[in-house]
Amino acid sequence: MLTELPHIPVDFVAGVAKTKKTDGLRKPYVELIKNWAEHEGMEEAGMRAICSIAGTQQVDADHMPKEFFPAFRKGGKAEELIQIIRKINDDIQSGEEMWTWAHVMRVMVDETIIMPSVTVNRFDTIICSMIPGKGKDTVRKNGDFRIMSDIKKTYQTMTSQSYLDPVEASNKEICQQVAKRFMPLKVMS
């Protein structure tokens, strides 16, 4: 034992986090609670604690934003969508993939998960509300959202020929990788 002090309760950590004025200052506490919850195999309880200290209103399967198509606003599909977004966030943050939130938005629009009328700022708000502890503007500043400028051009219709357009071809490849993450939603009834 390193100290005679008793273990610090999660409620105490969450309480200290709530006194911090910004998401950035709260982030270490959020990470601590998330890691502890994973260590204890109690991820859902950890998410509830994290949601209580997050600066933005949090989305859950019973309270999905109206910008999602109706099939993704309730029940199992809503829960699965939230989990997929959180896993994608982990992938983007790890830097192991070339994915950006711009690619994710392109896929979500093209796969009719989210309405095409959603602005980049609103997309930022929606995604941040699905990931406890994610700071505002971190989504809209991650990627080149010009990929969304031509709404009639989907990732499926982008060229895969790099000699024709290397940027578009790489965007298509990345979007296809991201789209695979959303496949479980398509197979759910």
Image (cartoon, grey):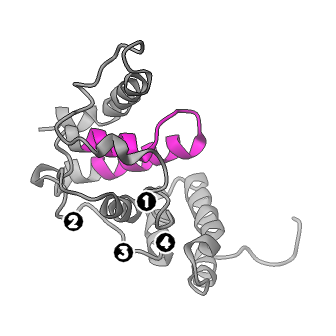
Label 4: how many Cα within 10 Å (few below 14, some 14–19, many 20+): many
Of tags 2 and 3, which is closer to the observer?
Answer: 3
| Mark number, residue 57 | 3
Asked if residue 72 lies left or right of residue 44, the reply is: left
Q: Residue at x 37, y 33 (%)?
A: 178
Q: Tell me the quarter of the image containing the C terminus.
A: top left
| Mark number, residue 49 | 4
**Vertical relation: 6 (above or below) 120:** below
Highlighted range, magenta: 80-108
Based on the displayed image, in which of its 4 quarters is residue 185 positioned? top left
Front position in the image: 63 or 121: 121
| 102 is within the stretch colored magenta | yes
Of tags 4 and 1, which is closer to the observer?
Answer: 1
Q: Measure the C-alpha gap from mark 4 to mark 1.
A: 13 Å
| 168 is within the stretch colored magenta | no
User: On the image, numbered disc 2 is attached to which residue?
Assistant: 62
Pointer 4 or 2: first along the chain: 4
Q: Position of residue 136 (x, y in %)?
A: 46, 67
User: On the image, numbered disc 1 is attached to which residue?
Assistant: 131
Q: Measure the C-alpha gap from mark 3 to mark 1.
A: 10 Å
Q: Position of residue 82 (x, y in %)?
A: 33, 53
